[in-house]
Image (tube, grey):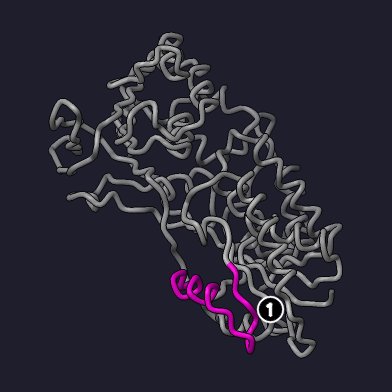
Amino acid sequence: MNAKIAIVGAGPSGCYTAQALLKCAPGLEVDVIDAQPTPFGLVRYGVAADHQGTKGVARQFARIFTRQGARFLGNLSIGDETTVEDLRQAYDAVVFAAGMSGDRRLGIPGDDLAGVIGSGALTRALYEHPDAGPFPVLGDTPVIIGTGNVAIDILRLLAKTPEELRGSDLGPGPSAWLAAQRFRKITVVGRSSAASARFSPVMIKELADLATVDLSVVFPDPDGASVLNTAVTSTSGPLPVEFRFESRPAALEKTGGGLHLQVETPQGRDTIAASSVISAIGFTSKGTLDRDAILRAADEPDGARGRVYATGWFRNGPVGAIPQCREEAQALAQRILSELQPDPDRVGRQLFAQHPDIVDFDHWQQIDAQEVAAAPADRCRQKISRREELLRPSNLQDA
């Protein structure tokens, strides 16, 4: 089939969609577009730096560009110079898989106070995203709100010793920042019961293996055989880590020493003292794309323009892990192929002929090779983090 398809977002959902489309119809012209100069999105900038096994899926994604014929168009932000309407005129189908990168607000009085930090902002700094802000000041008694895997990732990285970070891709700046922290206690607050917490049991087992932590639970799961209860009995390190379940955040107040978090519990209102609060309760759409308008267009086909589709977090909200992205992408590919009506007059990637700053997959391979070659002995790569350096192919070639 000779048709032109654009996929906006080079993370897991976008890559799996390209993979499924080209497996079924190798003749398609598939362009994977990303605002970053590097592909793989969440795999590079969202998966924890010490979870290199999960990051290994990038090798599978690379074959989409090196063997299956997809094109990577990096450093191209849709919604600025190029609009959604431009894409719809140029391609037979446009798939939006751009994820969600904005931190969801806590939605309580005081959630805009200094010292309240979004998990996305923190992990962008830790994982050296080109658009990351400065590292926050956490103080000695941070509180993490949320009991999903993102919250546990942050907790684990904060609690690890430098030796326990060996083999990760955590850079020298983030490594030094973590090493400089001096925590007296870390508290994790969740509104659900311990039995309903959304973290993976594997993540709790990882916590229990750390040298520093001493886990405890307020309002524990009454089932004494639960993974968290087992972890509590097996840890006795110098850093107290307290999980507080059934504690619904109600308000934040500024105090002389930091913050007071008011929570509603089965025993009434309680106050938790915090030097900072890390909110890990989910994400919202952020950037130049009008998500609501795109989702409406996906539900209202227009034969005169390329059809619009959405997948992954961009469509469903911030739920589901990488395996779910693959399942959804395979089903979406079948739907797209059944609905395609190729128009030979569509220009496809020629739309971007006058964009001088777009980078391709060859450019990424040079970056990848340089980062791996520059890795110190205790790391698997040395990330290039500044956008201007990621965009200098001459520097990459000379390295």
Read off the residue under disc 1: 356
In this rendered view, identify the residue nearer to me: 88 or 361: 88
In this rendered view, identify the residue nearer to me: 72 or 181: 72
Q: Residue furthest front?
A: 338
Relative to 57, is 206 above or below?
A: above
Relative to 379, is 204 above or below?
A: above
Quadrant where the N terminus lies?
A: bottom right
Q: Position of residue 148 (x, y in %)?
A: 43, 37
Does residue 116 show up? Answer: yes
Relative to 24, is 190 above or below?
A: above
Tell me which residue sits at (73%, 50%) in the image: 368
Left or right relative to 252: residue 178: right
Relative to 16, is 277 above or below?
A: above
Callout 1: helix, strand or loop? loop
Residue 320 falls inside the magenta stretch: no
Question: Which three-letter amino acid code belongs to the residue tagged 1?
Answer: Pro
Mark 1 surroundings within 10 Å by alpha-carbon count, few (fewer than 14), some (14 through 19), many (20 or more): few
In this rendered view, identify the residue nearer to me: 194 or 54: 194
Residue 295 falls inside the magenta stretch: yes
Q: Position of residue 99 (x, y in %)?
A: 53, 58
Q: Position of residue 334 (x, y in %)?
A: 72, 62
> What range of the chain is rendered magenta?
289-309
Does residue 260 show up? Answer: no
Tell me which residue sits at (39%, 15%) in the image: 223
Tell me which residue sits at (75%, 76%) in the image: 4
Left or right relative to 50: residue 278: left
In this rendered view, identify the residue nearer to me: 90 or 125: 90
